[in-house]
Image (cartoon, helix red, strand yellow):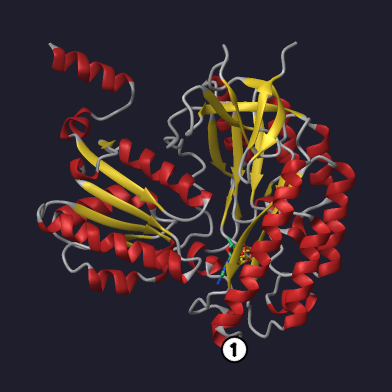
Amino acid sequence: MIYELLTLFLHWKNLDVKKIMANKKFYIETYGCQMNVADSEVVASVLKDNGYLKTQDINQADLILVNTCSIRENAEQRVWGRLDKFRQIKKGKPELKVGVIGCMAERLKEKLVEKEKTRPCVIGPDAYRALPSLLERVESGQKGINTILSKEETYGDIIPIRAAENNISAFISIMRGCNNMCSYCIVPYVRGRERSRDPQTILNETQLLAKECFKEITLLGQNVNSYNWEHKENKTNFSKLLDEAASKNPSLRFRFATSHPKDLSDEIIKTMAKHPNICKHIHLPVQSGSSKILKKMNRKYSREWYIDRIDAIKKHLPDAEITTDIMTGFCSETEEDHQETLSLMEYVQYDYAYMFKYSERPGTKAARVMDDDVPEETKKRRLNEIIDLQTKISEKNKLKTIGKSFDVLIEGTSKKSEDEHFGRNSQNQVVVFPKDDEKTGDIVKVKIDKTTPATLIGKKVQF
Ligand code: 5AD
Ligand code: SF4
């Protein structure tokens, strides 16, 4: 009787009883950017539809997946270390399947297959729909490999299973791939050509999340602001998509990442200014302050163009937080080029920056035709100077928030104290304040009275 009831319930939910009864468990580890986090959620959805349940306990897993990143050498090193660990677990549990998915799977297919002699499973970022059939092959003792890149795949029809447990914030991936071919970057080789997802599927997903009482959505893409959908008479660019998403979902607030400076139009900036529910934060990777280096990087903008975009943001969105990525020690970078990066940082006054040393990636244009000629010691010293300057600027900017009030979306309890909420303001700054009668998911006005290097600390404003 219970079996029949369960069968009926699963049938109603459109799930296959045999697959569910098989009750296999998968464990997934995700490295790299937010796109990878979103992809792991797509993978979880594909697996769930095929009878796998998610587990947080690696020892319970019948399948371990590692979603990988290739952006820098050290990102790959970390994954090799984890794969050694998984191989150890597999020794004591021969039926365990271990799969490498994502960017490293794409870049290092042969090497991964060679290392994983028994039943290798290697799946590139555009092949996640094939996961169940590849796993069946692995189960029957064969290789499960698919690293074919697609010109169309956007996973637009797959509703991801969200990884975050609080059901407050969600990612929606709106485009994939990159056509920019920055000379240092491996992304176009491992993620393929740029393609945008049907706007209707994006808007449907936003509305579904609003119904499920989510509060914040981050629209994601390798170059989110070059989103462009053209199909018959339907033409939607990023600004139009953002405008529609924000208008149709007043209960949600929207973020987006990552923007390319060359595609940051006035139209996008004005759309941000128009909607209170579009968060006032722009992540705008600059990489270098020197036009000569930007040209070598094939970034398709100059120092002057970048400054013009920053001026436009400051004009239309005076309270916006601006963050960036900076890479130091790229091929032929001189001391003068480095000084130009420092002076640009002074000009923009970034609130936060992700700062890296250039790491040569095999197969990129820079690796093929340029000399990685800045000595490691010089790269380290320049990186330290950049970090020191950014630390000072971030601290100064944080101090300016004292006395100001922000709408804070409560995301959970502060790690440091059970008695305090932790959340973020529209600018994406972390805010901590004492608990009263509010709950996670509420938006509360908080007045800041002190800061630490990473956090704003305040109190709820009583009306
Ligand atoms: N070396 C160092 N940093 C890199 N990035 C991309 N490629 C490389 C590389 N080869 C950085 C850029 C990019 C961020 C995601 O990673 O700053 O914006
Ligand atoms: Fe890489 Fe440049 Fe594309 Fe960003 S825009 S993913 S840095 S090639």
Is 423 left or right of 37, judged from the image as shown? Answer: right
Where residue 419 appears, as percent x and y from the top left, is: 50, 22
**Camera-side residue: 42 or 441?**
441
Is 324 left or right of 306, judged from the image as shown? Answer: left
Residue plotted at (19% across, 44% down):
59
Where residue 129 appears, as percent x and y from the top left, is: 38, 48
Q: Is residue 237 visible?
A: no
Q: Is residue 61 visible?
A: yes
Above or below, comparing residue 240 to residue 86 in the picture: above
Above or below, comparing residue 265 to residue 328 in the picture: above
Image quarter where the C terminus lies is top right
Residue plotted at (60% across, 39% down):
218
Label 1 residue SS: loop
Residue plotted at (28% across, 47% down):
132
Q: Quadrant of residue 372?
A: bottom right
Residue plotted at (83% across, 46% down):
267
Q: Sort mark 1 into few (<14), some (14-19) or many (20+) by Cα contacts within 10 Å.
A: few
**Camera-side residue: 338 or 316?**
338
Q: Quadrant of residue 9?
A: top left
Residue type of the residue flagged with mark 1: Asp
Where residue 269 appears, as percent x and y from the top left, is: 81, 45
- For label 1, the residue is 371
**Camera-side residue: 325 or 398?**
398
Above or below, comparing residue 292 to residue 228 in the picture: below
Where residue 282 appears, as percent x and y from the top left, is: 72, 47
Image quarter where the N terminus lies is top left
